Amino acid sequence: MTAADVASRPAGSTDRTGPVDELVFTAWSSVSPYGMEAAAYAEGIRGAASALADLDPEAFPGPYRQGALVPDFTAAGALGKKGTRTMDRVTALAVSTFGSLLDACGPALVERPESVALVLGTGSGSVQSIMDFTRDSLTGDRPYLVDPARFPNTVMNRAAGQSAIWHGIKGPNTTVAGGWLTGLLVLGYAGRLYRGGHCERVLCGVAEEYSEQRAWLEWHAADGDARIPLGEGGAAWLLESADAARAAGRTPLARLRGTRFRAYHRPAEAADALTRCVRALLDEAGADPADVRLVVPLGTEGEEDAVREALPTGQEPEWIHCRPLLGDTSAAATGFQTVALLALAAGGGLPAGQLALVTGIDRDGTVGCALLSG
């Protein structure tokens, strides 16, 4: 924490520089290609049901012929017509996902809205909004005459800010962008936000939209066989102290034991970087690698072998694979991996004392992992 962080700490906040109560996951939500409900996502992941489907080339032009889209989703359909006329898709997905999470937790969660933080992971915000606005400014009869109501959609933190305004959350509001590892970065940032005394609870989430513009960017960023179909949606979860959870009558689904990240210089070094990253996280948490029973990998080349290298010889954990079912959800990927694990935990899949890992290798030179326990 920097001196500026301390100076900007809100009045009445708690300084948690001493021993800190553990952070636990107590609720989660999802707006996914399986549907608008968390139960639909849990059923789809447990049943390993593919959400990929053929795309209508007229409705969804672009290089991909398949994708995993939230069924029949529109901002007005999900949130009503009031206040959604100029809302873009990624913002609507984020607002809807956080709304489902708050509905699951009940109104008491935001009785003190200034004590609740919101951290949202996204890519570039809405790539479609940015490109459409830029195009309109260049192709119109008078390039400087654009629709000002649509300008906020071009800002990366639009979805996070609108989510907080829509749901009356007045605590710290942060947007995180970090490629495929965004969901893991959200977890790490949320933990620091809480431990720095800036909030009592953190609403964490990720959101990504499907658009022709994003499709072309992803197509050119990947090579050949790496061009897998794209997915979209949102995932969110509540992080709070175990004491706060007990006081609110919420049952912890899992404990957050920590996050860890590492950089690599060349693609051939990525697997070794992840192995070192997982080992360092387990060591830092004082956890026994033999207790790792569940792993939710991003699904990049060499990732599973890298995780196995960090675990005892011969040990084979259970693997949960989201990418083959949901496609490449970009900035939402590790967030969807996290709620997949929580979905199994809610069904008794993460017993006390057992460990679970969420891992990823990003193509831009970073690896990361999060450790959860029952």
Image (cartoon, rainbow, N blue to C red):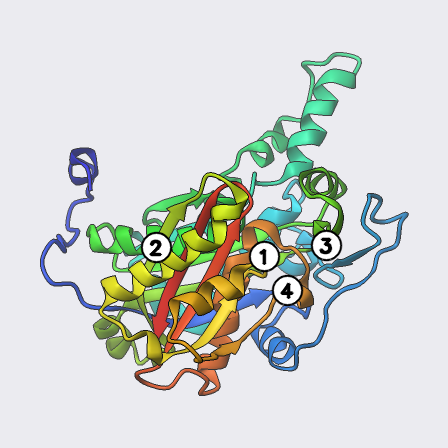
User: Which disc is residue 260 wearing?
Assistant: 2
- Answer with left or right where residue 135 lies relative to residue 54: left
Sequence order check, earlier mark of 3 and 1: 3
Residue position for label 4: 32
Using residue 374 as the reference point, say whether residue 139 is left or right of it.
right
Q: Answer whether labels 1 and 2 touch (C-beta < 8 Å).
A: no
User: From the viewer's perspective, is residue 134 above or below residue 355?
Assistant: above
In the picture, residue 155 is in which quadrant? top right
Tell whether 187 sits left or right of 343: left
Say which of marks 1 and 2 sits in front.
1
Residue at x-position 51% and y-position 58%: 334
- Element carrying mark 1: loop
Observer-nearest residue: 248 or 214? 214
Determine the CA span between mark 2 and mark 4: 27 Å
Tag 4, which secondary structure? loop
| Sequence-first disc among 4 and 3 | 4
Q: Position of residue 158 (x, y in %)?
A: 52, 40
Which numbered marker is on residue 300?
1
Which of the two discs, 4 and 3, sits closer to the camera? 3
Q: Residue at x 16, y 40 (%)?
A: 6
Disc 3 and disc 1 in contact, CB within 8 angstroms: no
- Residue at the far front: name it: 313
Query: Which of the two discs, 1 and 2, labels the residue nearer the N terminus?
Result: 2
Looking at the rendered structure, the kind of residue marked 2 is: Arg
Q: CA distance from mark 4 to mark 3?
A: 18 Å
- Which residue corresponds to mark 3? 228
